[in-house]
Image: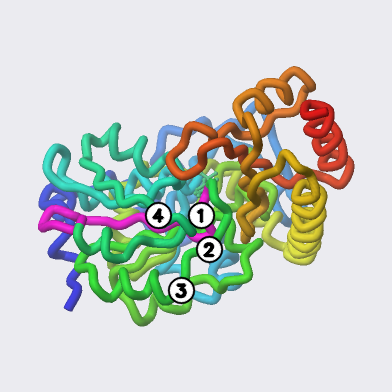
């Protein structure tokens, strides 16, 4: 039986978190003289969701209760199972700091994959066991099993995966969850674009799963920095203990709450992106210089070209930036191309064709 307490670092278990002034008081106060704020106002103001002018002189809700309620109702799980970070990158860092003893513990990652798992681990001095994906970009279950040792605390699975764009087989992910006595982090940053369903409903079944999602991609709010982690109440309470006290600023909380009312728009953009994705795929696949396109469940395509490195540099001179993944394991000669607007995609294809002609 998985017991989270067995893998939490002892110093984190013993940690007395910073208690904010607003944590301690539970009534309905009218006079706030507890946090050394400026009682006179703030030089800039905004409007709250009822259109009332609103300053930033007060500290924001440290637990983001209103925002969590909104996210909860959309995602269909209680607020106690929701953590919000200043981008999901922060959630990656917080998780590593809760479970991994620097210089001793390790995590498993499956390259080619999202770079922040390794960067965070390097910063935190956590060892990394790399188990590359198979040639079809699926999980190497045998390799993962062999890489697990007594100090392995977490396995990061990105699905749909960045930069390959494909989703991992559900059965494989469940196999990892069922056979690992540590935490399985499933990064679903691109889930809105995926044919596969989210693992959120399995949280009630598995205590060792945490799911990462973000408002940065399909929700169109990369500039706001809102990332989410979903997990057991026990896990989320450790994340809350370790996070910085006022980790989501007031402007972001207000804007994110307002933004989450626009599901219909987001669904429309997502539909449009998926249509554009198959258009772009069709146009590129017809060209002789395009060697391979990985079927994508995300808002980008991983495309193998002749001379990808030179193509990348040429596109830069034309004012178009894509992501050069040509020196990444299993991505030789590949560029990762984000799906743009119809016009942007047409221009990009024209520029690519002019490079090869
Ligand atoms: C973009 C991305 C994120 C980062 O999301 P933020 O919330 O903007 O920090 C996380 N995981 C993957 C796989 C991503 O591609």
- Please state the horizontal and vertical placement of residue 40, each as a whole percent of the image: 59, 31
152 inside magenta stretch? yes
Disc 1: residue Cβ within 8 A of ligand 1's nearest atom: yes
Which residue is pictured at 22% across the width and 64% down the height? Answer: 145
How many discs mark residues in the rendered view?
4
Q: Residue furthest front?
A: 288
Label annotation for residue 140: none
Residue labelled with disc 1: 161
- Could you tell which of marks 2 and 1 lies nearer the N-terminus? 1
Say if mark 2 contacts mark 3, CB within 8 Å.
no
Does dot 3 land on a helix, a strand or a loop?
helix
Q: Residue at x 28, y 67 (%)?
A: 234
Q: Nearer the viewer, residue 23 or 215?
A: 215
Counting residues from the N terminus, which is met first, the one under dot 4 or under dot 3? 4
Between residue 40 and residue 253, name the one nearer to us: 253
Residue closest to the far bottom: 205
The region drawn magenta spans 147-162
Asked if labels 1 and 4 touch by Cβ distance under 8 angstroms, the answer is: yes
- The residue carrying mark 3 is 170
Query: Local crowd at mark 3 within 10 Å, few (<14), some, or many (≥20)?
Result: few
Apparent side of residue 281 relative to residue 307 in the rendered image (left or right): right
| Residue 97 image position (x, y, % from top left) | 26, 45
Q: Is mark 2 within 8 Å of ligand 1?
A: no
Where 155 falls versus 356 (above or below)? below
Which residue matches tag 2?
A: 167
> Residues under labels 2 and 1: Cα distance?
6 Å
Whether residue 251 is visible to the viewer of this picture, yes or no, is no
CB of mark 4 within 8 Å of CB of mark 3? Answer: no
Is residue 42 found left or right of 339 in the rendered image?
A: left
What residue did someone put label 4 on?
Answer: 133
């Amino acid at each position: 039986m998985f017991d989270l307490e067995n893998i939490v670092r002892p110093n984190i278990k013993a940690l007395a978190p910073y208690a904010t002034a607003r944590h301690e008081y539970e009534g309905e106060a009218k006079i706030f003289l507890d946090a050394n704020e400026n009682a006179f106002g703030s030089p800039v103001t905004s409007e709250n969701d009822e259109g009332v002018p609103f300053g930033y002189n007060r500290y924001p809700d440290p637990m983001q209760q209103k925002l969590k309620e909104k996210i909860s109702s959309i995602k269909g799980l209680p607020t106690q199972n929701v953590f919000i970070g200043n981008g999901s990158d922060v959630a990656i860092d917080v998780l590593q700091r809760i479970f991994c003893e620097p210089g001793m513990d390790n995590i498993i990652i499956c390259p080619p994959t999202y770079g922040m798992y390794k960067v965070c681990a390097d910063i935190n001095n956590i060892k990394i066991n790399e188990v590359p994906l198979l040639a079809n970009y699926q999980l190497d279950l045998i390799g993962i099993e062999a890489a697990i040792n007594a100090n392995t605390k977490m396995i990061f699975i990105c699905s749909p995966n960045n930069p390959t764009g494909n989703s991992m087989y559900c059965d494989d992910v469940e196999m990892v969850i069922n056979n690992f006595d540590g935490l399985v982090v499933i990064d679903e940053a691109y889930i809105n674009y995926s044919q596969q369903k989210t693992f959120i409903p399995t949280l009630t079944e598995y205590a060792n799963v945490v799911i990462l999602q973000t408002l940065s991609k399909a929700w169109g709010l990369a500039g706001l920095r809102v990332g989410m982690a979903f997990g057991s109440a026990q896990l989320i309470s450790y994340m809350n203990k370790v996070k910085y006290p006022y980790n989501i600023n007031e402007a972001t909380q207000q804007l994110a709450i307002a933004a989450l009312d626009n599901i219909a728009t987001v669904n429309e953009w997502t539909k449009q992106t998926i249509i554009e994705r198959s258009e772009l795929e069709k146009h590129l696949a017809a060209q002789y210089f395009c060697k391979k396109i990985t079927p994508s469940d995300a808002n980008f395509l991983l495309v193998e070209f002749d001379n990808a490195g030179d193509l990348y540099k040429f596109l830069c001179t034309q004012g178009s930036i894509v992501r050069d993944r040509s020196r990444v394991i299993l991505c030789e000669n590949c560029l990762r191309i984000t799906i743009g607007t119809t016009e942007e995609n047409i221009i990009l294809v024209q520029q690519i064709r002019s490079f090869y002609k």
